[in-house]
Amino acid sequence: MLIDPERRCCRVVTGAVGPKPVVLADTTRSLAANAMPPELGAIRAEIAAVANEHDPVKLHMAAVTVGRAIGRALAAQ
């Protein structure tokens, strides 16, 4: 995850849900626009779509991990 407000740059990526890490473009746009973490359900849905993952446990764990990373990154700002 990258959040750099000075450069107006943000990128959210997740791994461990497929053969390679994937960029979460919708989550990135939402975070950049609102400076607030997106809803967990939205993160989960995007991971399912971009990683083509359907295991509910993997999806939940990945979404929670991304949500926590976003929260920590925002708290460090």
Image (tube, rainbow, N blue to C red):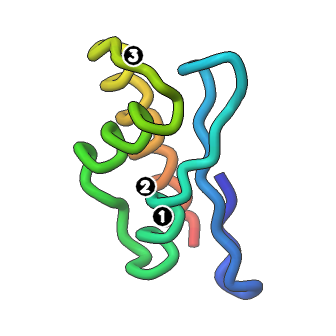
User: Which SS class for mark 3?
Assistant: helix
Left or right: residue 11 versus residue 40 is right
Q: Amino acid at mark 2?
A: Gly
Do residues under tags 1 and 2 come within 8 Å of each other at their CB atoms?
A: yes
Q: Residues within 10 Å of mark 3 (few under 14, many from 20)?
A: some
Do residues under tags 3 and 2 come within 8 Å of each other at their CB atoms?
A: no
Q: Residue at x 59, y 36 (%)?
A: 14
Reading the image, the residue beneath label 3 is 58
User: Which SS class for mark 2?
Assistant: helix
Which is nearer the N-term, disc 3 or disc 2?
Answer: 3
Relative vertical location of residue 58 with respect to residue 4 in this rendering, above or below: above
Which percent across, then down, holds residue 28?
53, 63
Which is nearer the N-term, disc 1 or disc 3?
Answer: 3
Q: Amino acid at mark 3?
A: Lys
Reading the image, the residue beneath label 1 is 75
In front of the other: label 1 or label 2? 2
Reading the image, the residue beneath label 2 is 71
Q: Which quadrant of the structure image shows residue 3? A: bottom right
